[in-house]
Image (cartoon, rainbow, N blue to C red):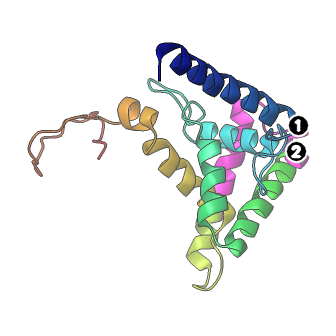
Amino acid sequence: MDRREAITRVGWLLGGSIIGANIFLKTGCKPSPKQVSELFSQDEVNLLNEIADTVLPETSSPGAKAAKVGDFMTVMVKDCYKPEDQKVFLDGLDKLSKSFKSQYGEDFIESDPKHRTAFLTALDIEQKEYMESKKEEDASHYFRMMKELILLGFFTSEIGATKALRYLPIPGRYSGNVPYKKGDRAWAI
């Protein structure tokens, strides 16, 4: 094969991939902007991000919204939860949204942060009472599921592990007895 033939073949390959991508995009193989997955719409993901950011707001480190915890939560619920737990989570998200609107007269996303915090604090008290009195076979409270996913999503994200926790990208030896001073951040493992 000579140089001219090699350039021609590379041109066909590159042109084919560009044309193929263009055809792929124009034939309707685009994700719907309204539906993120078969379980969650984009509005629900935005609501989850706002809930997460109310639970873990931005302080000296970025908040849960910056870590895109809402997106993480949708993946975990879709891929890791049993169908009955998915239903509890989705019904709870809907209930949270409707309860907030009936109590404050506005959507959670558009509301004042003080209202959000007061609402979620009351909801947290409710879920604690529910979890203490529930039977083993009963499903968990939906807000308990949300809080667990918020914490897991944030502290396992790059932002959570490097900005909120102390992080050593290349650790040295293991030392199980590290001195702790009041106010030090915990270690990301």
Q: Can residue 1 be seen?
A: yes
Give yes or no for contact between labels 1 and 2 (Cβ–Cβ under 8 Å): yes
In the depicted structure, whether residue 182 falls above or below residue 89: above
The residue that appears at 69% across and 37% down in the rendered structure is: 50
On screen, residue 11 versus residue 181, left or right, reads right
Residue that mark 2 sits on: 101
In the depicted structure, whether residue 1 falls above or below residue 4: below
In this view, the residue farthest toward the front is: 1
Which class describes the residues within 10 Å of circle 1: few (<14), some (14-19), or many (20+)?
A: some
Residue 179: quarter of image? top left
| Distance between the alpha carbons at the discs numbered 1 and 2 | 5 Å
Which class describes the residues within 10 Å of circle 2: few (<14), some (14-19), or many (20+)?
A: some
The x and y percentages for residue 92 are 76, 60
* Front residue of 11 and 172: 11
Mark linked to residue 171 = none
Q: Is residue 60 magenta?
A: no
The x and y percentages for residue 172 are 11, 39
Of labels 1 and 2, earlier in sequence is: 2
Q: Can residue 125 be seen?
A: no
Residue 163: quarter of image? top left
The x and y percentages for residue 84 are 71, 75
* Front residue of 183 and 45: 45
Q: Is residue 104 magenta?
A: yes
Q: Which residues are magenta?
A: 102-126
On screen, residue 89 versus residue 159, left or right, reads right
On screen, residue 181 versus residue 18, left or right, reads left
In the depicted structure, whether residue 1 falls above or below residue 135: above
The x and y percentages for residue 94 are 82, 55
Q: Amino acid at mark 1?
A: Glu
Q: Amino acid at mark 2?
A: Lys
The residue that appears at 12% across and 52% down in the rendered structure is: 176
Residue that mark 1 sits on: 106
